[in-house]
Amino acid sequence: MKKIALFASGSGSNVQAIADSVQKGEIPAEITILVCDQPDAYVIKRAEKLQIPVFAFRAKDYSSKAEFEREIVQKLQEAEVDYIFLAGYMRLIGETLLNAYGGKIVNIHPSLLPAFPGKDAIGQAFTARVKITGVTVHFVDEGMDTGPIIDQEMVRIANEDTRESLQVKIQQVEHQLYPKVIRQLVTEASRGEGKK
Ligand code: GRF
């Protein structure tokens, strides 16, 4: 069974959706660590309830990104992680993590990339008054939301939508799409190994 890490900074509703899907047996993987850069974030409470081991840190306790990423890599190695899924991790992944896990790091972003990369993608789409936005799952490279796209799903913005109602719609789609993509990736990776 593949071992996966989840990275988050906030509420962790995507972490919850992925963990629920793992528990139901839909994703053939074990979540062996949650990495969180905000020790007060609600996602840590969720992880404790879900009995997922947590590595929480504060970036300001380290002298550089390379330094805290070296520690993250060490924790990931101890947890024997095969794949990393970013779920609202609000930091750009640096060289140290990319060198160790390049091609194995996946992110979810709340817009149809390449439109609206970066922070507050939902607010950006709402303010731009586009009629269609959505959700993208993509591999992570050194850029901000620029890596190869794995899957996308669209969300229509209705005239009566507010920024808040749009966020609800986007999150509902995220909670379906991310577990689905993770299941596909993990299943394909396990099959590939079976053939060897
Ligand atoms: C999600 O909208 C995700 O697309 C973005 O950050 C948000 C995290 O939400 N990268 P949550 O913490 O999973 O509730």
Image: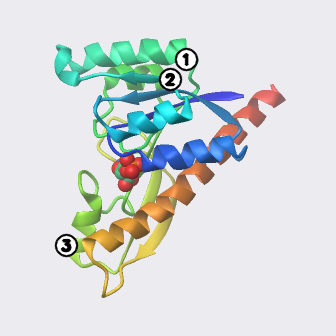
Residues 176 and 131: in front is: 176
Indicate whether 15 appears above or below 59.
Answer: below
N-terminal label among 2 and 3: 2
Under mark 1, the amino acid is: Ala
Apparent side of residue 172 relative to residue 119 in the rendered image (left or right): right
The residue pinned by badge 1 equals 79
Q: CA distance from mark 2 to mark 3?
A: 39 Å
Residues 61 and 139: in front is: 61
Indicate whether 71 appears above or below 101.
Answer: above
Res. 110 image quadrant: bottom left
At horizontal 31% and vertical 63% (from top left) the residue drawn is 115
Secondary structure beneath disc 2? loop
Res. 177 image quadrant: bottom right
Residue 33 picture location, percent across and down = 50, 25
At horizontal 45% and vertical 19% (from top left) the residue drawn is 100
| Residue count near mark 1 (Cα–Cα under 10 Å), binned few <14, some 14–19, many ≥20 | some
Identity of the residue furthest to the right in this view: 195
Q: Quadrant of the N terminus?
A: top right
Apparent side of residue 187 relative to residue 66 in the rendered image (left or right): right
Q: CA distance from mark 2 to mark 1?
A: 9 Å
Under mark 3, the amino acid is: Thr
Q: Answer yes or no: do the residues labelled 3 and 1 have beta carbons within 8 Å?
A: no
Q: Answer yes or no: do the residues labelled 2 and 1 have beta carbons within 8 Å?
A: yes
Residues 167 and 182: in front is: 167
The residue pinned by badge 3 equals 127
Apparent side of residue 57 relative to residue 104 in the rendered image (left or right): left
Q: Quadrant of the C terminus?
A: top right
The residue pinned by badge 2 equals 53
